[in-house]
Amino acid sequence: MISEPIRTALSEQLNREFSSAYLYLAMSAYCSHADFNGAAHWFRLQYEEEHMHATKVYDYLIEQGVEVPLRPIEQPPGEFGSLLAVFEASLEHEQHMTARLNDLSNQALSEKDHATYNLLQWFVNEQVEEEASVGAIIAKLRLVGEDGYGLLMIDNELGGRAAPAAV
Ligand code: FEO
């Protein structure tokens, strides 16, 4: 059984994961409207991945036998400015998520809640990969700048992203 503060913190994390999914769906829609269909595909898969993250937290709370309050999901922006700006917003968001997960891990450790800590370590490791992959895309986008051919090449590459493995 988990403590009340951990239950509250995890239900907030559950909400953050759903908010992330919603944000990535908004990013996917933005890219579709800007005719970057590869990037739209990339963000659509990111949406699915965040949905899986939310479900992983949800399943854990259910397994722990606690009530799971479902909070409202924040409305994401609809406009991001450019392909580079949308990936920069994604990186900033993931860095925010990493900080929250580190806070949660510290909380679980201070309560000697090792089951929750183990769950959170899966997320912390996932963050390393997420930040690295978005960072690599940003580096390429900065390299090509406004060059249309370069942007199309990157968009094409983003369209080849494979679906995430089930968690
Ligand atoms: Fe579930 Fe990208 O954090």
Image (cartoon, rainbow, N blue to C red):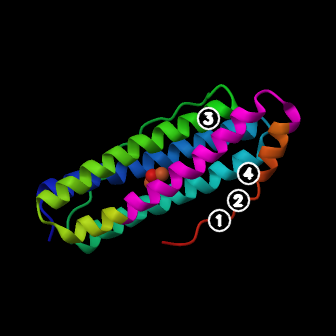
**Residue beneath label 4, please?**
158
Is 151 located above or below residue 1 in the figure?
Answer: above
Compare residues 143 and 67 and report the one nearer the observer.
143
Label 4, label 1: how many angstroms apart (C-alpha)? 12 Å
- Most distant residue in the right direction: 149
Q: Earlier in the sequence, mark 4 or mark 3?
A: 3
Assign a secondary structure to mark 1: loop
Give residue 41's position: percent from left, percent from top: 71, 52
Q: Amino acid at mark 4?
A: Leu
2 and 4 marks in contact (CB < 8 Å): yes
Residue in the picture at 24% in, 66% down: 116
Magenta region: which residues?
122-149
Q: Which disc, if any, is residue 161?
A: 2
Q: Which disc, if any, is residue 131?
A: none
User: Mark 4 against mark 1, which lies toward the viewer?
Assistant: 4
Label 2, label 4: how many angstroms apart (C-alpha)? 6 Å
Label 3, label 2: how many angstroms apart (C-alpha)? 17 Å
Give residue 4's position: percent from left, percent from top: 12, 57
Q: Amino acid at mark 2?
A: Arg
Q: What secondary structure is the stretch in magenta mostly built from?
A: helix
The quadrant in which residue 139 appears is top right
Q: Earlier in the sequence, mark 4 or mark 1?
A: 4
Mark 2 CB within 8 Å of ligand 1: no
Q: Quadrant of the N terminus?
A: bottom left
**Residue beneath label 1, please?**
163
Is residue 71 visible from the viewing direction of this image? no
Label 4, label 3: how many angstroms apart (C-alpha)? 14 Å
Residue 128 part of the magenta-drawn span: yes
Q: Judge the density around disc 2: few (<14), some (14-19), many (≥20) Cα neighbours within 10 Å.
A: some
Is residue 35 visible from the viewing direction of this image? yes
Compare residues 81 and 126 and report the one nearer the observer.
126
